[in-house]
Image (cartoon, rainbow, N blue to C red):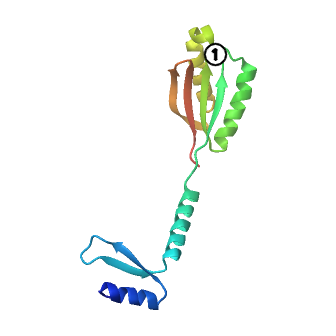
Amino acid sequence: MGIYTKGDAMRIANELELDLVEISPNADPPVCKVMDYKKFLYEQKKREKALKAKASKVTIKEIRFGPQTDDHDYEFKKKHAEKFLKEGAKLKAFVFFKGRSIVFKEQGQILLLRLAQDLEEFGKVEQMPKLEGKRMTMFIAPHKK
């Protein structure tokens, strides 16, 4: 449009039944724009909502093992892990050591590495087995589609 005084800009905004919005107050002279402010806010919220909907939500599913989990339980939990990875969720597999079972750290690590090997076609290991307190944790991320 052009450069107007504050009074002229206000008059133009009133004639058009719109709002005079200050864009850059620190500029010399201050920069203002004539617009429908409520419509502007509505459009901005709409854009933010669309961006939020497009953002991928990462879900983490957990599977818990004991250090001496038998084969049947292992297979049962492995099937659940496969399902979670196929659905696109990250998998957090952990071995929980109760009481004195902490002496079976090696068995827990072997169990998690066996799980990683069995699930190789469904996902890749993001974090190798790591002992944190009484838990040995491993993360597996699904393959990208």
**Residue drawn at (47%, 90%) of the image:** 16
Mark 1 closeness class: few <14, some 14–19, many ≥20 residues within 10 Å:
many
Indicate whether 145 appears above or below 99: below
Image quadrant in which the N terminus is located: bottom left
Nearest the viewer among 10 and 2 is 10
As drawn, the residue found furthest toward the bottom would be 15
What residue is drawn where x is 74% and y is 22%?
73
Residue 37: x %, y % from top left:
48, 76
Report the side of 126 relative to 88 (left or right).
left
Q: Answer left or right for 60 relative to 13.
A: right
Residue found at x 75% / y 21%:
72
Q: Label 1 belongs to which residue?
A: 67
Please state which amino acid type lies under the numbered disc 1: Pro
- Which image quadrant for residue 65? top right
- Up the image or down, 12 lies above or below 30; here it is below
In the image, residue 19 above or below residue 65:
below
